[in-house]
Amino acid sequence: MARVALVTGGSRGIGEAISKRLKADGYEVAATYAGNDEKAAAFTEATGIKTYKWNVGSYEESAAGIAKVEAELGPIDVVVANAGITRDAPFHKMTPAQWQEVIDTNLTGVFNTVHPIWPGMRDRKFGRVIVISSINGQKGQFGQVNYAATKAGDLGIVKSLAQEGARAGITANAICPGYIATEMVMAIPEEVRAKIVAGIPAGRLGEPEEIARCVAFLAADDAGFINGSTISANGAQFFV
Ligand code: CAA
């Protein structure tokens, strides 16, 4: 039986590449999305990957959605907490709403995604938890106090889960992508983005498939001793 993988935010951006890669590697994949029905339908049409709509910021919606995925596809073996948003602003202009939206999606969203799946992984003595953090959780970023806080928090979640899951055959690892060519990065004002790219030794943005490659590595059955680690994929922009 194929292993089942859930990818939040799995129909667009980095998540889309992750969903496709896992499907190509033989996983039964479920991809979640938050709002864009049209894009999700086109994604399913093109890939055959089922999509499910819920807000990862809501525990109730996440638990209900996960129960539906498990009823339709079987128990989830691999969970990729990828869904994330930005609400960039310098700190003196950042509103409480911009802070809260990012916390709800990028940090609480990881709790909401993993928590309902975790007991089943413990019972079955197998699980792969992969959280998509960010280079900006490692180094901070002008204009991203909210986002950097969540992405650093995601690393704390992973390091703690790794210790709790290790004896139950569950691994938890993080990937810190650098600047990847997705809508999120393309939304940065062009002149700002040009300066960022100039600071990447690789001289280019990363491709979503280069992050999916890391996920495939961590998700594998024989990756069981890689636990609590952080893979940086950033074109040599930053070293921990
Ligand atoms: N370092 C130092 N100063 C900076 C700066 C930086 N990195 N970026 C901007 N500034 C300065 C500007 O030079 C300008 O200074 P002056 O006023 O002296 O001219 C000032 O800050 C701009 O201030 P504003 O009040 O005009 O700022 P703004 O309201 O226009 O907001 C911003 C600016 C939203 C922060 C914008 O610079 C921006 O979008 N920056 C990019 C942030 C970023 O990297 N986001 C990542 C998104 S992608 C992602 O998050 C994926 C991932 O995981 C990597």
Image (spheres, grey):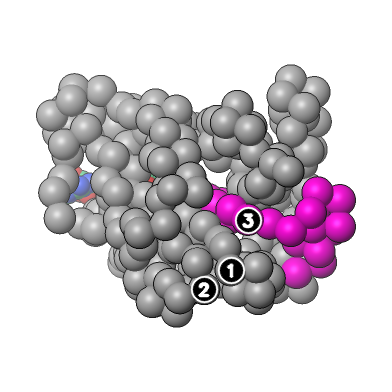
Say if 129 sits above or below 116 in the image.
above
Mark 2, Cα crowd under 10 Å, few <14 / some 14-19 / many 20+, is some
Question: Is 1 a magenta residue?
Answer: no
Specify the quadrant of the image occupied by residue 64: bottom right
Q: Residues within 10 Å of mark 1 (few under 14, many from 20)?
A: some
Identify the image quadrant of the N terminus. Answer: top right
Per the image, the residue denoted by label 3 is 77
Label 2 C-beta lies within 8 Å of the nearest ligand 1 atom? no
- Per the rendering, the mark at residue 125 is 1
Q: Position of residue 157 (x, y in %)?
A: 42, 72
Numbered disc 3: secondary structure:
loop
Helix, strand or loop at disc 2?
Answer: helix
Residue 19 lies left or right of residue 52; in this view the side is left
Q: Which residue is mark 2?
A: 168
Q: Is residue 32 visible?
A: yes
Look at the image and give the residue range highlighted in magenta.
Answer: 63-90
